[in-house]
Image (cartoon, rainbow, N blue to C red):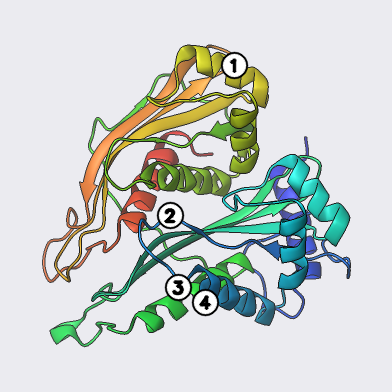
């Protein structure tokens, strides 16, 4: 297996071919031998709305595509993508399976797919937006090569006497899309909020082997709350964090979903041991990550604080045991001492901080 340093160098070189004319790159956003092919490009799927409310997904997609194109990314024409989706009766836009990825590459020449979820979209003050995007190859086995998230609120930085408050929803939305486009094309990603977990929140039964690359499948979390999509959102945050760690080969969620549907596996109350046994073989994976969400709330109002409560479990194929688990409940006000400093304004940002802290301290490199 090539070293991580050599792989990173290769990825950075290939991104230059795809994103011509960009500023010096801090992080690679693409991989694949054909990244610089004039025929190739990225198909930007319609956005999946996980916000639990209405969201202008068409306008958000168009603006994201425009910003990415301005930064040099070659985009598959929307009309060509729509024809492909109609031809294949493609309805689900939250992931891509192997057959769809190969057909997209064969029929349109697209070398990658950008899959984007709207986690939060609220226009009443303070306006809030949270988006997550991942770049997936259209190879025989689709691979996630880059994943970024952004979560903004109009009261993220109120400042003295509220001079920093942003009241216009469009201003918050534009800023979120710009940050996401920059992060996806080698720019600086939005910082992950610092979150302090409880002393007994994370349990590591057995450390993972240092330096080993693990193949992992992340299943949608069982949502016990009222949000409706919190389980999918938490799974996305774990996928993003594991991808960033560099030692995990995370299976594209669209592939996982397709296999679950094909084998008619329904997990209404989470993953049973029998389910896990079948999934290990079906997905050819070393690890399975699953969990449940008890609370995931973005309360309305300038002084309202988000709440996130979830647990997660990592199952290992070789031992057939849980090697890692976590569970905690946090609010956006937990780290505030005075003047709202340290406040986290959205549940998406709070969840990202919790996931990062839990994974980094026990499953990191």
Query: How far apart are the alpha carbons under marks 2 and 3?
Result: 16 Å
Badge 2: how crowded within 10 Å, few (<14), some, or many (20+)?
many
State the quadrant of the C terminus. top right
Q: CA distance from mark 1 to mark 3?
A: 40 Å
Q: Position of 143 compared to 305: left or right? A: right
Residue highlighted by disc 4: 178
Lower sequence index among marks 2 and 1 = 2
Report the mark closest to the observer, 4 or 2.
2
Location of residue 23 with respect to 328 vertically, above or below? below
Residue farthest along the left direction in this orientation: 338
Cα gap from disc 3 to disc 4, whole angstroms: 5 Å
As helix, strand or loop, the secondary structure at mark 4 comes to helix
- Label 1 – label 4 distance at C-alpha: 42 Å
Which numbered circle lies on residue 142? none
Residue 90 shown left or right of residue 220 in the figure: right
Asked if residue 342 shows in the view, the reply is yes
Graded by Cα atoms within 10 Å as few (under 14), some (14 to 19) or many (20 or more), the crowding at tag 3 reads many
**Vertical side of 37 occupied by 243: above or below:** above
Mark 4 closeness class: few <14, some 14–19, many ≥20 residues within 10 Å: some
The dot on residue 278 is 1
Q: Is residue 42 visible?
A: no
Judging depth in this view, the residue of 112 and 196 nearest the camera is 112
- Give the residue number, with chain letter if any, for mark 2: 50
For numbered disc 1, what is the local secondary structure? Answer: helix
> Of the residues under marks 2 and 3, which one precedes in the sequence?
2
Quadrant of the rendered image containing residue 337:
bottom left
Q: Which mark is residue 176?
A: 3
């Amino acid at each position: 297996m090539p070293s991580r340093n050599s792989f990173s160098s290769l990825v950075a070189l290939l991104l230059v071919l795809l994103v011509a004319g960009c500023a010096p790159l801090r992080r690679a956003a693409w991989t694949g031998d054909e990244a610089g092919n004039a025929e190739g490009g990225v198909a930007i799927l319609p956005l999946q709305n996980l916000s639990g409310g209405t969201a202008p997904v068409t306008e958000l997609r168009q603006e994201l595509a425009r910003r990415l194109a301005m930064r040099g990314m070659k985009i598959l024409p929307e009309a060509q993508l729509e024809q492909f989706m109609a031809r294949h009766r493609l309805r689900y836009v939250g992931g891509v399976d192997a057959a769809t990825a190969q057909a997209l590459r064969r029929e349109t020449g697209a070398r990658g797919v950008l899959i984007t979820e709207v986690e939060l979209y609220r226009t009443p003050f303070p306006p809030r937006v949270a988006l997550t995007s991942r770049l997936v190859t259209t190879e025989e086995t689709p691979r996630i090569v880059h994943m970024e998230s952004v979560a903004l609120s109009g009261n993220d930085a109120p400042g003295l006497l509220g001079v920093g408050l942003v009241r216009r929803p469009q201003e918050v939305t534009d800023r979120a899309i710009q940050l996401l486009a920059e992060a996806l094309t080698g720019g600086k990603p939005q910082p992950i909020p610092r979150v302090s977990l409880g002393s007994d929140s994370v349990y590591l039964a057995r450390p993972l082997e240092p330096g080993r690359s693990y193949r992992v499948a992340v299943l949608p979390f069982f949502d016990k709350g009222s949000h409706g999509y919190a389980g999918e959102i938490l799974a996305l945050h774990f996928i993003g964090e594991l991808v960033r760690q560099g030692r995990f080969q995370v299976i594209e969620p669209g592939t996982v979903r397709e296999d679950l549907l094909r084998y008619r596996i329904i997990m209404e109350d989470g993953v049973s041991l029998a389910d896990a046994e079948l999934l290990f073989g079906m997905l050819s994976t070393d690890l399975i990550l699953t969990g449940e969400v008890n609370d995931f709330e973005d309360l309305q109002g300038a002084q309202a604080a988000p709440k996130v409560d979830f647990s997660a479990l990592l199952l290992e194929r070789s031992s057939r045991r849980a090697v890692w688990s976590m569970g905690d409940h946090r609010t956006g006000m937990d780290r505030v001492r005075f003047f709202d400093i340290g406040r986290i304004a959205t549940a998406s940002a709070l969840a990202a901080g919790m996931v990062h802290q839990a994974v980094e301290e026990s499953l990191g490199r």
